Image (spheres, rainbow, N blue to C red):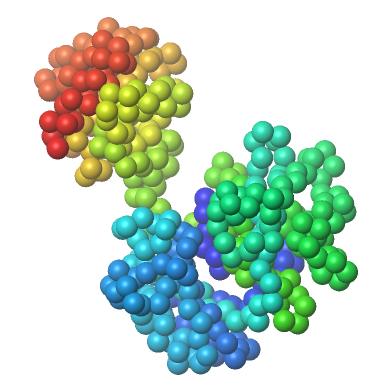
Amino acid sequence: MNIHEYQAKGVLKSFGVPVPDGAPAMDVDGAGDVAAGLEGPVFVVKSQIHAGGRGKGKFKELGPEAKGGVRVADTVAEVRAHAAEMLGNTLVTVQTGPTGKKVSRLYVENGSRIESEFYISLLIDRATSRVAFVVSTEGGMDIETVAAQTPEKVVTLTVDPATGLMPYHGRLVAKALGLQGDLAAQAGLLATQLYTAFTATDMEMLEINPLVLTGDGRLVCLDAKVGFDSNALDRRPELASLRDEMEEDARELAASRHDLSYIALDGNIGCMVNGAGLAMATMDIIKHHGGEPANFLDVGGGATAEKVAAAFKIITTDPSVKGILVNIFGGIMRCDVIAEGVVEAVKEVGLKVPLVVRLEGTNVAEGKKIIAESGLDVIAADDLDDAARKIVIAAKGRN
């Protein structure tokens, strides 16, 4: 689960992490009030969307010459003017895609006099089962670009969970940032604070870009991006309350409510499969036959007919879908349950695109009988290769 910058800074601040003073605003008057309550004299007005590249982004409604989604203001009146332009408009960045995201909230904070910019992040290193620090002197840039062009400027170090963060980790972070003396001590303390916040709140990712050295000799987190482990939210209701459903794909949100694993993609063939591995294989073979999957959807091993029906409805709400492939290998999941769910959903929402169904495994005969006697216009498939070939051909006929 991702959260907004102002929420991330609020979480970090509770662990002692240094961040600029600021507050969120939902309207123009609120933005002006926040600025009036800050020390100033320079303010920063930031669009709050779940995407990076906001500063270089452009608002669809304002034209290519308009300023981006992060703006500096010298007066409260200028803050209000920026807020009036940004709120309610669609910000397009390198991470939002061409559709962009509507800005419905802002974050107004004190400006900072920046001497140097750094990069620091924490994430889960799956290969070592450790928390990893990724540190660079090249703050303010995409870390992927830095890693590709100047890999020697990216330092990665991991923390053994058996020992936790040790003092030498802080010294390594300071060394990677090229800091000495008091600044090295600040970097060591910051590393401890970030690690504590990361582990105490079940974060999956914490990125500070940039971490800045201010004119008065302080390290301050100027931006913050945080993602939490969604599986841990049941035990952290205070974090679950930070979720902004307006920032999430409507289909992915609906899937989460039904405990379905769904990820929207850019293709035109909807997929409903049981099992993550089989779902990946299904997507691969669709591409092998020249098609493009519109989603990853795993209904799981113990789905009910109601859950299957919900999954089918989610697929059909995607306007880009020109065909649907249901691929079930019944182990724990029974083919007749899948068939009942598909029939129930089709009868409720209708079938406007080709549907290919491949069933194999537990109760396969019963499942095929349910489909055959349903009266639905369903294309049967003998195996996965046959199913993928048929749905690609059928979907192309709909384009």
- Residue 22 in picture, x, y percent from top left: 59, 78
Question: Quarter holding the C terminus?
Answer: top left
- Residue 334 in picture, x, y percent from top left: 37, 15
85 relative to 226, above or below: below
Outermost residue toward the top in this view: 365
Total tally of numbered discs in the picture = 0
17 relative to 316, above or below: below
Residue 172 in view here: yes
Q: Is residue 254 left or right of residue 6?
A: left
- Residue 321 in picture, x, y percent from top left: 23, 38
Occupied quadrant, residue 220: bottom right
Residue that appears at 31% across and 58% down: 99
Residue that appears at 40% across and 40% down: 263
350 relative to 76, above or below: above
Residue that appears at 86% across and 71% down: 182
Outermost residue toward the front in this view: 149
Q: Is residue 93 left or right of residue 238?
A: left
**Front one among 277 and 216:** 216
- Residue 207 in picture, x, y percent from top left: 62, 57
**Front one among 73 and 337:** 73
Occupied quadrant, residue 230: top right
Q: Is residue 171 left or right of residue 39?
A: right
Residue that appears at 48% across and 78% down: 71
**Front one among 308 and 1:** 1
Residue 299 in view here: no
254 relative to 325, above or below: below
